[in-house]
Amino acid sequence: MFLFLRLEITFMVSNSNNDRRILLAHGSGGRMTQELIEEVFGTAFANPFLDRMDDAASLDLTGRIAFTIDSHVVSPIFFPGGDIGRLSLTGTVNDLAMMGARPLYISAGFIIEEGLPFQDLQTIVSSMQQAAAEADVEVVAGDTKVVERGAADGIFITTSGVGSIPAGIQISASGARPGDAVIVSGTIGDHGAAIISRRGGMDFNVELTSDCAPLGGLVADMLAASSEIHALRDPTRGGVAATLNEIAAASGVDIEIGEDLIPFQGEVRAACELLGLDPLFLANEGKLVAFVAQADAARVLDAMRRHPLGADACIVGSVAAAERDHCRVFARTVLGSRRILSMPSGEQLPRIC
Amino acid sequence: MPLSFLDDFRRGDHVRALMNRLEKSAAALERPVRIMEVCGTHTMAISRHGIRQALPPNLKLISGPGCPVCVTANSDIDTFIEMALLPGVIATTFGDMLRVPGTRMGLAEARGRGARVQIVYSTLDALRLARENPESKIIFFGIGFETTAPTIAAAIAEASSSGLDNFLVLSAHKTVPRALTALCSTPELAVDAFLCPGHVTAMIGPHAYDAVVADYGLPCVIAGFEPADILQSLIMLCGQLAVGRAEVALQYTRGVRPDGNPTAMALLHQVFSPCDAEWRGLGVIPGSGLAIRDEFAAHDAARHFQVDAGYSHEPRGCLCGAILTGLKTPGECGLFGKACTPDHPVGPCMVSSEGTCAAYYLYETNDVL
Amino acid sequence: MCLAIPAKIVSIDNQRATVEVGGLTREASVVLLPDAGLGDYVLMHAGFAISLVDEDEALETIRLFEQLAGGSFLGEGPSETGLDGLSPGGTGLDGLSPAE
Ligand code: SF4
């Protein structure tokens, strides 16, 4: 009863401001849920699968399928270069692409905190659709729940996706081999720097922009250029440092990169210097790291550079047989000495000391 | 875009030429020498640029007590956490403090238990929070040496003059010269020379080290933080050691004035007065802390909140104390890399990314040293 | 101990300045450095300008490195560090360095 009363009041206040907000009733499964679905999701994602309003999408898929899921809880939900909608779509598309798969269909679950402005949800959903169009995928199933204020931070989005793996493609985190070249597809740390500078109230007058973008097209071009791409990964949380350590461990190899070979945006580097952060530990949302047979490296690099999302691609290091019984990642410093590049630990926080 | 006055001091050709020169300088030494880098930011730079691995074998760099997080005593951390858990309080501090474990819990855990903890980049941000949240008390955990303390003094002075009564500071600041002389008087200390902190010196001025040279005969070079700066400073130290001379010399000429920063030091002394302070690993060093003066008592969290943090003790098995004085290296700690890692730090030397143990772990080894 | 990086003052109004680092600008307080002026490089620590970067000294240091790297170094006389009395050993790089 109390709850009901509170909701009514919220609703009236909201209406009088002409500032509509998501209410618990929007997730109740009743009339308001229906309205929400039609008004927001149905319009944005309109496609034959979704329009049927069945309990599940029925899809024709043949051959080997890549299937993945990813939850997104970014704060703030809007950031320069994207928002949680774009992020949640590209995150899953990129995971599929890193298997060499062609991303096809996406499903999305929304957990919304009551009180989220209706307009915000609309913006998030339309940027999700925009990213889906860029990635050439369709959102074919969805679900929405509304939780009480405080039970979520604005909105959480979980997406899962399927993609088809072309015949003959064998790409895996365990596929890197001694002798492979390590290629990154562009400047490092852009997303993480954008988020941290926003979150920390850093007030940089130049906005750092997230690199959030779907990588399926870039991967397709790479695969067309070479059949010797052994491993791919998008260096999201934990950044390039985490990705290299994961690949080294999964493949049983050592990896060495040259610090001076890593491409950075000037502003990102400046922000990292100011805040005491290491860009190699910062998240990327539109970049990949590729492990390619040395003989094909130049060809793959060339194909990448011709794609807009790979224009700044470069070779940053190489893979070697593991020197010890556990695998390590080294960075060659300006002095020419090697230091260990370890997994980042914990949250990256601005430091002054 | 190149970063002015940063990239210039990281150039590969310069750094390699300096390393060659350092090898020659070190070859002229009659015996192996141990140089202590006092400052944690030097520790980080040395690790990050792989300097330790590249040094001539008769030159050993050991890390000193210059990480403000590492030297903060558990009792201060415990007190701040008790304050953070009070209702109506927003606890603010610099990023490095968040993961520091106290006797019973760390700040991150206090946050999990409902404390409002906000990481800020500057006291200016904490002041802004105080203005935006007049109904809350904003407590800033003041840590750091003479570089940072004036920025906290500036915030206290501003809060005082603008009547921002909900801005309070728990001062756990430390001062460097006292600690250095205390360190020098440790009988077991096996250090031949000091690499002194450029940014602290930008405030206190180069003469602050005169006593180290006069009373203990240990060479001091005030160094910048880029690889070329550090290598040049080591060359300068080798030069002094080779002829048995001990002087205060300045490598970081672009950043340090002969009289330091008198404005900043005046503000520091206007707001703070010297007090005894407990340093983790070094114990209580008389006169090495900074207490908020009576005139600014309204902004002193220690006076405003009479919290009882209970019994504080240092983590068991942790060698931070000996590591901070240069008597042990992280590899000699039985917990290093096993029970104690950056993800699960036992001692503060692992918590702060510039802590000696963290710097060794992050940049130098995944193995036992 | 203390991270501080060089930033250029691009505007200044009383105790507030806007500083620029590598194309990025943000606010800084110059309350600790009242002499700082437009166009100066300052060391920024935790949102405060704490010291002027002496550009001549910086260029002098770079010039020394340049000579060392170029091999033209040994013929040079002793160089000044800019702080007399403090540093009889000079930069440690000059031809009179005791290590020679
Ligand atoms: S490794 Fe951990 S427990 Fe050991 S001295 Fe360092 S911080 Fe303390």
Image (cartoon, helix red, strand yellow):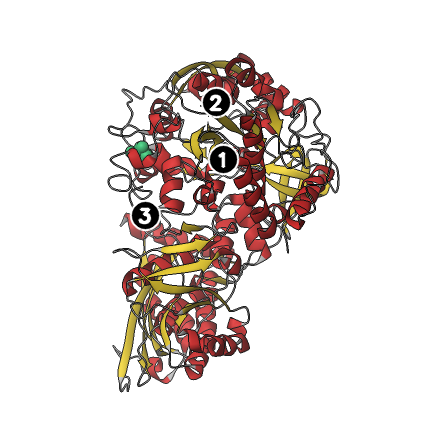
Q: Which residue, given by chain and number where applicable, does mark 3 sit on? A: B366
Packing grade of label 3 (10 A; few <14, some 14-19, many >=20) is some
The answer as to whether callout 1 falls within 8 Å of ligand 1 is: no
Q: CA gap, disc 3 to disc 2?
A: 32 Å
User: Measured from the top left, where is residue A18 in percent x and y?
Assistant: 50, 59
> Earlier along the polypeptide chain: callout 1 or callout 3?
1
Packing grade of label 2 (10 A; few <14, some 14-19, many >=20) is many
For mark 1, give the secondary structure.
Answer: loop
Q: Which residue, given by chain and number where applicable, does mark 2 sit on? A: B174
Q: Looking at the picture, which amino acid does disc 2 mark?
A: Lys
User: Measured from the top left, where is residue A250 in percent x and y?
Assistant: 28, 63
> Earlier along the polypeptide chain: callout 3 or callout 2?
2
Work out whether residue A145 can be spotted.
yes
Report if the CB atoms under discs 1 and 3 are less than 8 Å apart: no
Residue C55's label in the rendered image is none
Q: Which residue, given by chain and number where applicable, does mark 1 sit on? A: B133
